[in-house]
Image (spheres, rainbow, N blue to C red):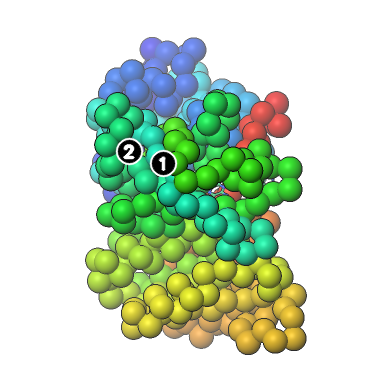
Amino acid sequence: MYKISVITEDDFEVTFECPPSEDIISAGVGSDVILLSSCHEGGCATCKAECLEGEYELGRCSVQALPPDEEEASKVLLCRTYPRSDLVIRVPYTFERISFQKANTDWQGEIVAVEKIASNVAKLQIEPKDLETGMAVQIPFLAGQYLDIEIPGTGTSRCYSMATIDDDPSLDFLIRILPDGRFSQFLSSEAVPGVVMKLRGPFGGFNIRENGLRARYFVAGGTGLAPVLSMIRYMKREQHPQEAKLFFGVTHQHEVFYLAELKKLEAEMPNLKVYVTVMKPDSDWQGCTGTVVDELIKQLRDAKVKPDIYLCGPPAMIDATFAAAATCGVPKEQVYVEKFLASGAAVAAE
Ligand SMILES: Cc1cc2nc3c(=O)[nH]c(=O)nc-3n(C[C@H](O)[C@H](O)[C@H](O)COP(=O)(O)OP(=O)(O)OC[C@H]3O[C@@H](n4cnc5c(N)ncnc54)[C@H](O)[C@@H]3O)c2cc1C
Ligand code: FES
């Protein structure tokens, strides 16, 4: 048995034991220490942490979830980390995010509506229900988190981030339609009001951080808008005073969605400014052109105090934005990221 010491972002320490044959997440669960995790197969990066001391062996991980340079820098996926000595591990979240008893993560949800809102995006609205009684419930979640949603009768599930907040009557998801995608096909053919689906979660550590009055910039590519919209809606409900800027980008004009919702939020929140950018616009486009990164750089150059940046979307956009933020002097600790990794990424890496 090895001793595992987990140090949180706010410098609390939690310890438990782990045998060499078990991964850290499972050993934590066995000792009633529930650390953040989701896929448990090295594919989603929810359990990413840094090993400060000790020897370990890593099981197979997706390169997207744990790129080689991060592996070199002692980053680990705890669901794939097997100790070979006592370990000291730093997790990128606060003590309150660790639970000490297993919370309910199994739910069901009834589809209320499915609507195509752009050429490649559908909005899925689900009413959450208790798994046993079937009664309507509110799933407690933090703005920015996601659920695993199962395609009925298949055992296949996908992760989707809520665009709503926890006291809204329905869970709204913004889902990119991929031509050969399994969930995408389900949405186009079988997903109709009344269909009941299994839900699991909430998961994820992509949430608003309390960093005083520092401004918050939200950068979203395509359906990456979902979790940042949830955060902005949360800021509105809680009347957070921080200056907020939303940079929302797509490639083609026919991929733009939620313009009216974003304008309404901007009108209702005096501290919010929204920039919608289209990379290849039609001649009648009135908004910003180029990429979200172009627009972000312009704003960052003018910012006297560097803001916190919340970043979500496909991996390539994230990498470009991360690099731009660094060039503009934003410390990397102030950039919080959610990558919409493709399903099966861990399996593909094996
Ligand atoms: C934490 C997390 C949160 C997520 N939240 C959202 C969300 O809110 N909205 C959303 O739209 N997606 C989100 N995703 C991605 C989502 O889980 C699915 O991977 C995606 O919707 C594809 O599912 P599918 O079944 O339609 O396609 P699949 O059957 O999984 O894939 C079909 C084909 O498309 C490829 N592919 C898969 N994803 C992508 C991609 N992003 N870009 C290009 N090719 C791809 C696959 O490799 C495969 O070849 C999230 C992912 C993670 C890890
Ligand atoms: S829970 Fe470890 S990578 Fe998904």
Camera-nearest residue between 104 and 330: 104
Q: For disc 2, does the CB lie below 8 Å from ligand 1? A: no
The reply to whether residue 97 is in sight is: no
Residue wearing tag 1: 110
Where residue 165 appears, as percent x and y from the top left, is 34, 56
Q: Horizontal placement of 69 versus 4: left or right?
A: right
Mark 2 and mark 1 in contact (Cβ < 8 Å)?
A: yes
Q: Residue at x 62, y 64 (%)?
A: 118
Quarter for ligand 1? top right
Q: Is residue 69 above or below residue 100?
A: below
Q: Horizontal placement of 240 versus 79: left or right?
A: left
Where residue 158 appears, as percent x and y from the top left, is 55, 38
Q: Residue at x 69, y 49 (%)?
A: 178
Quadrant showing the C terminus: top right
Residue 98: quarter of image = top left
The reply to whether residue 113 is in sight is: yes
Residue wearing tag 2: 129
Please, what is the three-letter code of the amino acid marked with disc 2? Lys
Camera-nearest residue between 15 and 107: 107
Q: Horizontal placement of 222 versus 270: left or right?
A: right
Q: Residue at x 35, y 24 (%)?
A: 28
Where residue 90 appears, as percent x and y from the top left, is 40, 40
Please, what is the three-letter code of the amino acid marked with disc 1? Glu
Q: Is residue 154 above or below residue 217?
A: above
Q: Determine whether the residue tagged by mark 2 lies in a helix, strand or loop.
A: strand
Q: CA distance from mark 1 to mark 2?
A: 7 Å
Q: Which one is earlier in the sequence, the residue at label 1 or at label 2?
A: 1
> Callout 1 environment at 10 Å: few (<14), some (14 to 19), or many (20+)?
many
